[in-house]
Image (tube, rainbow, N blue to C red):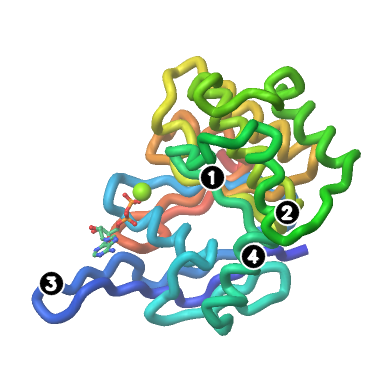
Amino acid sequence: MEILRCNGIEKIFGKGENQVTALNGINLSVEKGDFVAITGASGSGKSTLLHILGSVDKPTKGTVTIDGVDISGLNATDSAIFRRRKVGLVYQFYNLIPTLTAEKNILMPMLLDRRTPNAKYFKAIVKTLGLEDKLECLPSQLSGGQQQRVAIARSLIYRPAILFADEPTGNLDQKNSKEIIDLLKLSNRNLKQTILLITHDEKIALEADRIVTIEDGKIVSDQTEKRR
Ligand SMILES: Nc1ncnc2c1ncn2[C@@H]1O[C@H](COP(=O)(O)OP(=O)(O)O)[C@@H](O)[C@H]1O
Ligand SMILES: [Mg+2]
């Protein structure tokens, strides 16, 4: 089942002489349960693409459909709700709320909607991410790797149609990076979470089932594991 499709995505920043074409005709389809890495040099357009797919930004041209919804057509309010409930976003920086415990941070997207999480699923996420002993801790009491695990748990709480992670290990040492990538893999396998991981690190990209490479805002290669 197709969970994400984008057609003819273009993104132009600025005007006149300062104009930058960040994306130049991106077509991409992701199946449910896939673990895809998007890779490319710095400045190739990876983050711009992720912002558009995650409905944080709008394309200049083209359409994005996630889980059957054309997000290009949503207004600002619907787009914010869609982002909270249907997509998970994880960045290099964890953006946790410093005054709230790990548990409250994980539950935050649901608390904002005055919803109660499914207790069984909450437990499964916490267990998958190895956070059982850390739920009462404040972010300042956690290591960088542990804070990123909390951020990933928060991004998963709504069982998003797709999890987007933009250089999630960019701020971590090698050991913690490996741990985070392994946990993403585990979420993909155990929770059947569809994941789109952005990284400039080819070694990390190799952990995915499929590698899409971008150069100058265009897809230049798209390989699934069997063919590598
Ligand atoms: N808000 C912006 N305004 C102007 N140019 C931008 C903006 N965001 C990104 N760009 C430009 O678009 C291109 C792609 O950037 P980006 O998507 O951040 O690349 P990557 O994440 O692969 O490093 C770069 O040339 C960058 O300078
Ligand atoms: Mg980037």
Q: Closer to the camera, 137 or 150?
A: 137
Q: Is residue 151 visible?
A: yes
Q: Quick one: label 4 or label 1, which is nearer the N terminus? A: 4
Q: Quick one: label 2 or label 3, which is nearer the N terminus? A: 3
Residue under the point 73% across and 53% down? 110
Q: Quick one: label 4 or label 2, which is nearer the N terminus? A: 4
Q: Of tags 4 and 1, which is closer to the observer? A: 1
Q: Residues under labels 2 and 1: Cα distance?
A: 17 Å
Q: Of tags 2 and 3, which is closer to the observer? A: 2
Q: Residues within 10 Å of mark 4 (few under 14, many from 20)?
A: many
Residue designated by label 1: 90
Q: Residues within 10 Å of mark 1 (few under 14, many from 20)?
A: many
Q: Is mark 3 within 8 Å of ligand 1?
A: yes
Q: Is mark 1 within 8 Å of ligand 2?
A: no
**Residue 120 x %, y %:** 90, 39
**Ligand 1 image-quadrant field:** bottom left
Q: Residues under labels 4 and 2: Cα distance?
A: 23 Å
Q: Of tags 4 and 2, which is closer to the observer? A: 2
Q: Of tags 3 and 4, which is closer to the observer? A: 3
**Residue 41 x %, y %:** 31, 45
Residue designated by label 3: 18
Q: Residues under labels 4 and 1: Cα distance?
A: 18 Å
Q: Quick one: label 3 or label 1, which is nearer the N terminus? A: 3
Residue designated by label 2: 110
**Residue 174 x %, y %:** 45, 18
Residue type at tag 2 = Met
Residue under the point 80% across and 57% down? 115
Residue type at tag 3 = Asn
